[in-house]
Image: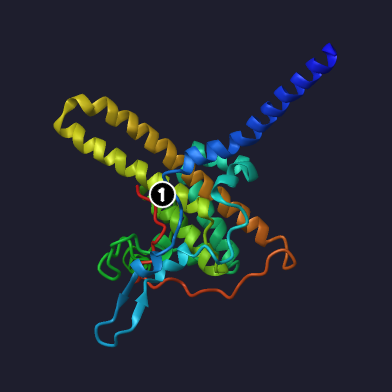
Amino acid sequence: RAPTVVAAGLGRVLRKESTRDALRPHLLATMCYCLFSGETDGLQEGMSKVDKRTGEVIVDARFRFYDLQREKFNIALDEAPCAEPLCCAATCCCYPCGIYYARKMTLEHLSPEMGMDNYMCCQGYNPPGMPGPCCCCCNGQDCKSVFRTDMCPHACALGEAFCCPGCAASATRFAMMDHYTLGVHKVDVQIMQLNNCIQCLACICDIIALFDKAFENLAHIVHCIADLVFTATISCMVSQIHNEIKFRERGPAVAVAAPSAPMADASSPLMGEKMER
């Protein structure tokens, strides 16, 4: 009976280990995303306003970027490093170069005849809170006419990627989403929420450190963490765009483009998923 007892005991141990291994990814995922639900329920009501003259309910145009029911990117942000490891690693080493590459690749994909000739600052998507015609440095059309970005689009795109990487990467992503009528994965929203939270925490720590020198080391640590999270998020976004373009270019049998949405009006606040930076 001894071998039987030993075999039975060993079987129970192996079953416990296999169960623990099976649960481990779910536990890790729960720990990572427990503070960021990624839910968009009730968001439409919060992003709507009533026209005082007509009484009509007007939904903010940026709500479309939060629609979880629309067709989504081929891969989610958390899948991008495994799907495009080289692109993700290269962007981590120099994310402004990766952002510029993503913009160039996207414009050449969406309009092969024009390519970078269609470049505009933030691609016409104003950062949140920025007025349209009143801010020529963030308004695509005005920036094009004032600073003549059409004369050197490559240099301007690279400068945009260095000066405002979050806006530049998000604008490229929005251009893809508008063209193919894409929504977002739930985990994409969670990662954006995580990044925004870390960036806000870093700002708070910097402000506290101005008044209390004892917080300087803590602020420096939080800043380093925020930079790492931001770099990782940007790398995932660039990799997601790179993968989507490859997915769309495999042929009409694989991906059929939806009717192109018009380019965002420069006066419209369409930065619903903008990352804090």
As rendered, which of 172 and 16 lies closer to the eye?
16
Snapshot quadrant of residue 73: bottom right
In the figure, is residue 154 to the left or right of 141? Answer: right
As rendered, which of 147 and 196 lies closer to the eye?
196
As rendered, which of 241 and 118 lies closer to the eye?
241
Percent x, y for residue 181? 55, 69
Percent x, y for residue 94? 48, 39
- Can residue 94 be seen in this snapshot? no
**Residue beneath the point at 51% across and 41% down:** 30
Residue furthest front as drawn: 1
Percent x, y for residue 79? 60, 46
The residue type indicated by label 1 comes to Gln
Residue furthest left as drawn: 211
Is 142 drawn above or below residue 226 in the view shown? below
- Can residue 76 be seen in this snapshot? yes
In the figure, is residue 128 to the left or right of 103? Answer: left
**Residue beneath the point at 58% across and 76% down:** 259
The colour style of the image is rainbow
Circle 1 residue: 193
**Residue beneath the point at 35% across and 63% down:** 126
Percent x, y for residue 31? 48, 38
For label 1, the SS is: helix
The N terminus lies in quadrant: top right
Residue furthest top as drawn: 2
In the figure, is residue 42 to the left or right of 247? Answer: left
Snapshot quadrant of residue 228: top left
Is 218 drawn above or below residue 35 in the view shown? above
Is 174 drawn above or below residue 26 in the view shown? below
